[in-house]
Amino acid sequence: MDRAELIARLTPIIATYAQDKDAVASINENTDFIKDLKINSANLVDVVLDVEEEFDIEIDNVSMERMLNVSAAMEIIEDKLKSK
Amino acid sequence: MIGNDIVDLVQAAIDSNWKRKGYLDKIFNTEEQFMITSGIHPSMIIWLLWSMKESAYKIYSREAKLREFAPLKLQCSNLIIHNDTATGNVSYENELYHTASFFDENYIHTIASTKLEELEKVEIKITDRALFDYKKTKPASVSHHGAYLALVYL
């Protein structure tokens, strides 16, 4: 999966929980889930669970700890897909 | 240093489906899940424990200048619940935080500190999320969620 496809599949997931809908329009690898998209911290769990379902992977707790922005999420997804 | 966290229970019910498969496992350890499922108000205990973790995390992340999403590393213990208040501890990265919470049917509010005596000294102001310039009042800790704004002054 290339990065464009990955971000295209990731965007609708994070858009669901973003409170700043304007920031969703300009999502890029530097976008921070909390600072930019204003995702509620309790919904970060939903992002993780949705990503697990969408990509059929399991995100361990150590990976989850750093899943606070788009680039980290992409790295984690790529990593888990490789080790499948 | 003091940390605080408010949970608007109406907002939380709208935004989060804690019954979702895997949800509790990502946030709460076995002992915490036992506290949640053994009572008659599981959602109350969920947001109480969550606000304890969040208020302690806010202190740690400010002091360590470090951000992470590690709810399982924040471990709640010694939870004692009274009518509308609760006390407890949260441990995180070799640090022990004391917490004091207040709750009613609308919200849960928790303050945390490494110093127990600090919890008794603070002034707490909880308001509707009004558009007043609270920064001028120099709060020690700020939390907002849903309809509420919580300010803590030392």
Image: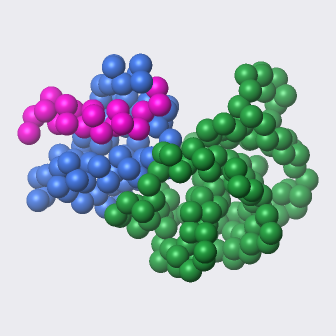
Left or right: A22, with A80 as reference point: right
Left or right: B122, with B88 as reference point: right
Part of the protein shown in magenta = A1-20
Relative image position of residue A25 (x, y in whole percent): 33, 20
Dividing the picture into quadrants, the one containing residue A63 is bottom left
Find out whether residue B61 is within the magenta segment.
no
Q: Colour of chain B?
A: green
Left or right: B118, with A14 as reference point: right
Dividing the picture into quadrants, the one containing residue B95 is bottom right
Q: Which chain is blue?
A: A
The mark total stands at: 0
Relative image position of residue B7 (x, y in whole percent): 64, 49
Residue B68 in view (yes/no): no
Relative image position of residue A1 (x, y in whole percent): 8, 39
What residue sits 25% from the left and 37% below the top? Answer: A10
What residue sits 50% from the left and 46% below the top? Answer: B14
> From what the image shows, is residue B68 above or below residue A20?
below
Residue B22 in view (yes/no): yes
Q: Nearer the viewer, residue B125 or A77?
A: B125
Furthest toward the right, the residue is B121
Q: How is the image coloured?
A: by chain
Which quadrant: the C terminus of chain A?
bottom left
What residue sits 84% from the left and 57% below the top? Answer: B119
